[in-house]
Image (spheres, helix red, strand yellow):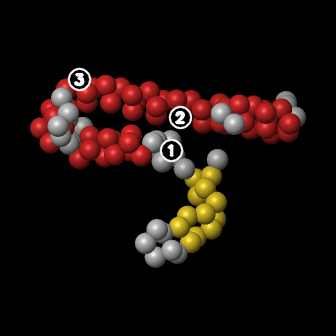
Amino acid sequence: MHTAAMACAICDVKVEGNFSQTAFDRLSPEDQRFLEQYLLAGFSIKTLEQTTPLGYAAIRSRLDRLIANYKALVKMDAQKKAVLEQLRASEISVAEAKRKLERLSGD
């Protein structure tokens, strides 16, 4: 998958093209914010405890959820790539590839 257009919310400049998105880009805004906080804390739960109102259990729970969400996105990417490879090798039809990709995307 790719992004076809990007726009600046401040100046309304729009750019069109093919922009790839990583699994990190597709994390929820909440997961992205938590990952940024964790990064800025030097990947230290102890430092994050000191700089946020969250306790160890809450931080650990959010970190575990973030890891699970990221792994799910990476797995989905691999599954989509496998479907496209099957299509390229003429192992499945375009209709079957479309059906599989839609199922993977939850559509």
Q: Which mark is residue 92?
A: none
Q: Which residue sits furthest front?
A: 53
Q: Mark 1 points at which residue?
A: 26
Between tags 3 and 2, which lies in front?
Answer: 3
Between tags 3 and 1, which lies in front?
Answer: 3
Q: What element carries label 1?
A: loop
Q: Residue at point 48% right, 69% down?
A: 8
Looking at the image, do the residues carrying marks 1 and 2 touch, with CB atoms under 8 Å apart?
A: yes
Instruction: Residue 18: tell me if it is visible.
Output: no
Q: Earlier in the sequence, mark 3 or mark 2?
A: 3
Q: Earlier in the sequence, mark 3 or mark 1?
A: 1
Q: Which x, y percent locates residue 97? A: 79, 35
Q: Residue 93, relative to residue 37: is it above or below?
A: above
Q: Residue at point 34% right, 46% down?
A: 33
Instruction: Residue 92: tell me if it is visible.
Output: yes
Q: Residue 57 carries which label?
A: 3
In which quadrant of the rendered view does residue 15 lie? bottom right
Q: What element carries label 2?
A: helix
Spatial CA distance of label 1 from label 2 is 8 Å
Q: Name the residue under label 2.
A: 73
Query: Three-letter amino acid code at disc 2?
Result: Leu
The crowd level at tag 1 (other Cα within 10 Å; few <14, some 14-19, many 20+) is few
